Amino acid sequence: MIKSSRWLLSRNRMSLNAGQAVRLDELLQANQALLTVYLLRDELKRLWFQRSPERTYQAWRQWVQQPHESGIQALQRFARLLEP
């Protein structure tokens, strides 16, 4: 199910039509780990739009902590790769 939905997961929610949004919601409800990764992906994207370096750094520190608390090993490895 996830493999056939890769396109949905890579798109921004705003660019999905109603049927695609429903399908994405069903997919995320069926898999808690996938939902966690999807939400953290969106939070990571938002870091690029912070207006001040201080806010960016604070948001970054909060983001980095979340993968470590998630218990998802692949996500934890990814976060370690991004840490300076």
Image: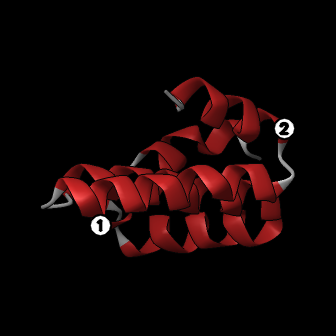
Could you tell me residue 32's position as x and y percent? Answer: 80, 65
Q: Secondary structure at mark 1?
A: helix
The residue shown at (47%, 64%) is 20
Of 26 and 32, the residue lying toward us: 32
The residue shown at (74%, 72%) is 29
- Measure the alpha-carbon separation of dots 1 and 2: 29 Å
Q: Which mark is residue 14?
A: 1
34 on left or right of 38 = right
Q: Which mark is residue 73?
A: 2
The residue shown at (79%, 57%) is 70
Label 2 sits on what residue type?
Answer: Gln
Could you tell me residue 7's position as x and y percent? Answer: 49, 41
| Quarter occupied by residue 6 | top right
> Comparing marks 1 and 2, which lies closer to the viewer?
2
Q: Is residue 81 above or below residue 23?
A: above
| Quarter occupied by residue 33 | bottom right
29 on left or right of 46 = right
Of 13 and 59, the residue lying toward us: 59
Q: Is residue 44 above or below residue 6?
A: below
How many other residues sit within 10 Å of disc 1, few (<14), some (14-19) or many (≥20)? few
Give the mark nearer the N terminus: 1 vs 2.
1
Inspect this view and state whether residue 55 appears.
Answer: yes
Label 1 sits on what residue type?
Answer: Met
Could you tell me residue 26's position as x and y percent? Answer: 68, 71
Of 67 and 13, the residue lying toward us: 67
